[in-house]
Amino acid sequence: MSWTDERIATLKKMWEGGSTASQIAEELGGVSRNAVIGKAHRLGLKSRPSPVKAGEKKKAPAKKPAPKAAVKKTAAKPAAKPAVNPTDKPATAQASGASIPSQPIPNKTPDLPKIVSVGPGGFLRQGPGDQQAPIPPAPPRRLVPAKPSPAIEDKTSLLDLTEKICRWPMGHPGEPDFHFCGEAVNPGYPYCVEHCGRAYQAQLPRGARRPPPPLPFGGPRVR
DNA sequence: CCCTGATTCGC
DNA sequence: GCGAATCAGG
């Protein structure tokens, strides 16, 4: 698999968006986690919170004292780890739990716990027992089609994203009809009002809490 | 063990 | 340029 423009764009978006290399690799398909990381670095993408470099010390760098002597990959290898099969999706059901809507289905709210809180922009979060309708901050908006019509002429491409349009992904990157919401954003936020409600959910005090959805990416895939 | 990103280095 | 192997921290 080669790094096409679109794949690179997706990589950038997800990397900068905070998705892990594993998620990105799985999303892109045909590439390993290492490939994603390597490419990201080659692209000059900054290293985000990495576990290794968490505690960066500004002391005199001891450079590389022992570079492993002779590190031969082409020979003398005890055992090779099974590489990711490019033609097969292992679908390692790891599911970090971040449940993300892959389709804009407004009335489909699986199992929201009782949440009554206010998001950063004043978005009310309510549980299923409560009213789900009242989200009045904005005037009547045109509803995003729940079922993508065959003609997605006005779809928002990855390259069409600006600071003024909602960048909530519809579907998954790489899929034929993958695009972005494209609505006008809620001022000060990367998403439109509707998707702000999805993106920003207050943490529950404790006890029954839902896995945080930092970003729309990483949603459960059906493969 | 699992995860993560960083780095190396043969190709 | 690519990415598997490897490293190293959490």
Image (spheres, coloured by chain):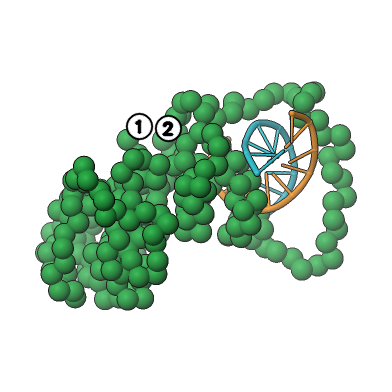
Chain colours: A green, B orange, C cyan
Q: Dot 2: what SS?
A: loop
Q: In the rendered image, which quarter is residue A214 located in?
A: bottom left
Image quarter (top left, top right, bottom left or bottom right) of the N terminus of chain A: top right
Res A91 label: 2
The residues bearing labels 1 and 2 have C-alpha atoms spaced at a distance of 7 Å
Q: Residue at coordinates 86% horizontally, 34% vertically from top-left?
A: A70
Q: Residue at coordinates 85% horizontally, 51% vertically from top-left?
A: A64
Q: In the rendered image, which quarter is residue A63 located in?
A: bottom right
Residue A166 in the image, given as x and y percentages of width and height: 32, 64
Residue A151 in the image, given as x and y percentages of width and height: 22, 46
Q: Chain of mark 1?
A: A
Marks 1 and 2 share the same chain: yes
Return the residue at label 1. Answer: A223
Q: Chain of mark 2?
A: A
- As shown in the figure, which amino acid type bears the numbered disc 2? Ala
Residue A155 in the image, given as x and y percentages of width and height: 29, 53
Q: Residue at coordinates 63% horizontally, 57% vertically from top-left?
A: A44
Q: Residue at coordinates 81% horizontally, 67% vertically from top-left?
A: A59
- As shown in the figure, which amino acid type bears the numbered disc 1? Arg
